[in-house]
Amino acid sequence: SQQGEEDPQALSIQEGENATMNCSYKTSINNLQWYRQNSGRGLVHLILIRSNEREKHSGRLRVTLDTSKKSSSLLITASRAADTASYFCATENVGTSGSRLTFGEGTQLTVNP
Amino acid sequence: DTEVTQTPKHLVMGMTNKKSLKCEQHMGHRAMYWYKQKAKKPPELMFVYSYEKLSINESVPSRFSPECPNSSLLNLHLHALQPEDSALYLCASREQVSYNEQFFGPGTRLTVL
């Protein structure tokens, strides 16, 4: 079953605006990762935040993690048309058979020129 | 070389056919993954290979048969598939040290008639 839930499911903004996507999960995690997927293509890793970290930056991306609320957010600043894609959060859990990534439902971001 | 390649890009097969999907990486990664992704849904984990041994099988039907002939190559053998198996099949790899990013291939778009 999918652990992560993302909202909004879809987001449409104008170029230059900021985009914020949220992810909630249910069980303890080792880390949380964000990936981007352009239509029908493979996923591209954006950023990884470990369970003992609260905030991380990479270029125009800012990720926060609140383990007490079991939630994370991805902020893309000064968005560009090229940022149009689906964004997935993925939690890493360690079970008896090993570690696995479980993906949230995703947010479809459209950035209008 | 920092990419994961997958062949073929597209595959159409009948329910009685046998076909194989291929995935290759030359990054020295020792963990490799197969995911299935339906349209507008997140990727779902199917299999995990660690050091060329199958470590996780997410209760995938036996009509899907994975194989890891060496540390760079991962195959997915398909036999007697159903139309509902039509999906994007994604391969991924990462260093065996857990808790880091996965590198995804572009996927194989499979259609079962």
Image: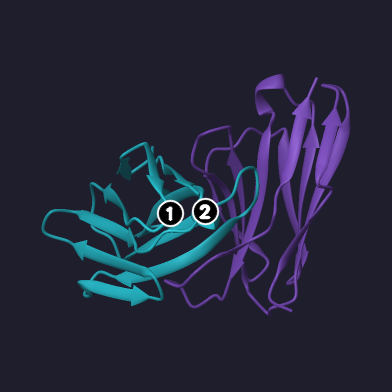
Q: Which chain is purple?
A: B
Residue B88, horizontal then vertical, whole percent: 67, 40
**Rendered image: mark on residue B38:** none
- The amino acid type of the residue labelled 1 equals Glu
Viewer-proximal residue among B17 and A110: A110
* Residue bearing the label numbered 2: A81
Which of the 4 quarters of the picture holds residue B68?
Answer: bottom right
Residue occupying the point 73% across, 72% down: B71
C-alpha gap between disc 2 and disc 1: 6 Å
Residue B59 vertical placement versus B75 (above, below): above
Q: Residue A74 versus residue B96: which sits nearer the camera? A: A74
Instruction: State yes or no: discs 2 and 1 in contact (Cβ < 8 Å).
Output: yes
The residue carrying mark 1 is: A15
Upstream in sequence: badge 2 or badge 1: 1
Chain letter of the cyan region: A
Question: Which residue, as the protein is rendered here, is positioned at the far left?
Answer: A68
Label 1 SS:
loop
